[in-house]
Image: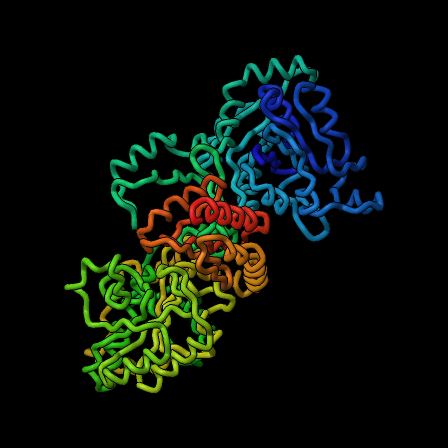
Amino acid sequence: MTGFVVVGTDTDAGKTAFSLLFLTAFAEAFAYWKPVETGDSDTEKVRRLVPTTPVHEPLVRFTEPVAPPLAASRANRPMPAAADILTTLPATERPLLIETFGGALSPLTDDTLQAELVRSFRLPVVLVGSSAIGAVGRTLAAIHGMAPFGLRPAAVVLIGPDDDYAAGRITRFADLPVVGLQPPPAEWTSATLAAAATAQSGRLAAVRSAVTPHAARGAAPATLLDADARTVWHPYTPLQPADAPLPVVAAEDEFLTLADGRRVIDGISSWWTVLHGHRPPAVMQAVRDATHTLDHVLFAGATHPHAVELAGHLLGSMPWGPGGRVFYSDNGSTAVEVALKLAYQASCHRGEPQRTLFVGFENGYHGDTFGAMSIGRDPLFFGRFEPLLFRALQVPLSAAALDAALARHAGEVAAVVIEPLVQGAGGMRMHTPVELRALSDAARRHGVYVIADEVMTGFGRTGSLWAFEQADIAPDLVCAAKGISGGVLPLAATLAAPDVVAAFDTPDRSRTFFHGHSFTANPIACAAAVASWRLLEAGRWRVDVRRIEAFWEQHVSPLAALPGVTDVRVRGLIAAVELDVPGGYLADVGGRLRRACLDRGVLLRPLGNVLYSLPPLCTSNESLARIADAMGHAVRSCGG
């Protein structure tokens, strides 16, 4: 669906006046729909005054000019919910101008506000208000009132005599374009509307530009990509890439909007960071609120409420009991570095400085800093740096192999590092909770710390809040990042169990953990993470994970029967299809798979011969169907 939604600051703000002027100016380009009407019919008014515009009938119409839920109650008729209205969207080839009733916070039903419906349309919003005295306060109040619902107008329209002061104040405090429009001075007819629209054509064109996805949102695609090619070095991408980067100008829920107006489904949560969906209203509001009081404060010798609250939530989810601590950093790789240093230094403090060896697993990946590279040891990614890496063992992911390695190197190993249940960058390779428990037991028998790298698997993505929970184990150190802030801002944390903390809990300053970052525990990032955690506490994520996992089992698992498919793996939000193609991560098929999915409006980033999806929790069944269809199409066209 394309178009935009017209929302008022309140009742009689001028929404219909704006709609009439806009449709008169662009009668051949838009269609009109007002899904809920009370009182005099605006639908009939538009149909009479702008006869060249396609006008769609409202879903419900009440003659009494009162709030729709009240009108419905008095008329003894049901009031449709937002979902009912969405299912009746008119079938039209033209973009829709959708006019709402009252204000954004007007009740839609007895238990929902109209803002919920406006959000569901997933379209740009034009906020209309009167330019009469009080315009600044009314407009800013409406803008702030919509913010918790994730709604931010693309433009503000003030109906009535021009007020440069009001327009300037609104632009200053809301950072939004403001357009003034005057309705016909005399009787409203098609002729007087046409005259008013012609006289204000430039202003109306400005509104149209503001609600057109590719307009007024940065450089045009060609200009943006040319500048990118001259200046930017992208991660995990050759400097002479096979494909140009996607010019992304907006994001919402599971969708990314490109500079040319296309909307694609972000089927990999933007590298596994976006948890609830892009720009979740509660998290974005928490960020805005935090910026009103803090930007950043050093975390050595100072603290702030957001970091303390988040630490309490994180530790409360651990199986240790009291005594654990949270060490903040800024990304997953660094969280792993912190865990490695803590494990070794704790070993030293307990009188075992000879424990200088770490154990990782084949196909494991823990990041790109030197400690993380040493544990991952992937020959493709890190082979060039082999002479610079510290000692680490790579063993097959099996308890027997780990037990044998620890026995051969008795007393030498500080810690074992594992991605619980799913090895992400290694190809979405999965193991069972039983196997994970056996690995932990083997480490315990040899007195070795267990580090759980939950950077990708944490925050519900495998079906439990932390993947290690499914094995009923208690790691000594847990690394968290990516989804910790909901994917809104960079943040990471290393959670240390009480026995690790105890090794440092002394007045001896020489046993201090000397590690830190300038932006450790950034208050705004921590505020976002607290808001994200509260969304998790509400529990909806469990329903969404089960829903998405069941969808993958039904619609992606059958791809295992296709020629060229060696395996299909599903766990929680993850669905992975492995193709029988040589080359591993460098296999040419990866690029072909990506392009085939993008042709279907789905952004995926294959791990070589492994095509996978890991979408945000909010992803609708309709979007899941498009992802599954794209994966099937890609496998059939590239993998056979």
- In terms of depth relative to the viewer, which is nearer, 534 or 27? 27
- Quadrant position of residue 413: bottom left
Q: Residue at x 54, y 56 (%)?
A: 558
- Determine the residue positioned at 62% across, 36% down: 8
In this image, 456 relative to 401: left or right? right
Residue 446 percent coordinates (x, y): 31, 86
In the rendered view, does 429 fall on the left or right side of 201? left
Please state, as top left, top right, bottom left or bottom right, where the N terminus lies in the image.
Answer: top right
Q: Nearer the viewer, residue 561 or 1?
A: 561
Whether residue 279 is visible, yes or no, is no
Tell me the residue at 46%/74% (across/down).
Answer: 433
Q: How is the image coloured?
A: rainbow
User: In the figure, 139 relative to 472: above or below?
Assistant: above
Taking 25 as reference, is 399 above or below it? below
Q: Position of residue 538 (x, y in %)?
A: 57, 63
Q: Quadrant of residue 19?
A: top right
Vertical arrangement, residue 37 with respect to residue 312, above or below: above
Residue 219 percent coordinates (x, y): 37, 32
Judge left or right: residue 430 versus residue 548.
left
In this orientation, which residue lies closer to the viewer: 545 or 67?
A: 545
Query: Image point 64% across, 40% down: which residue?
Result: 103
For the image, the number of numbered tags is 0
Which percent across, then down, holds residue 231?
25, 38
In the rendered view, tell whether residue 418 sits above or below residue 203: below
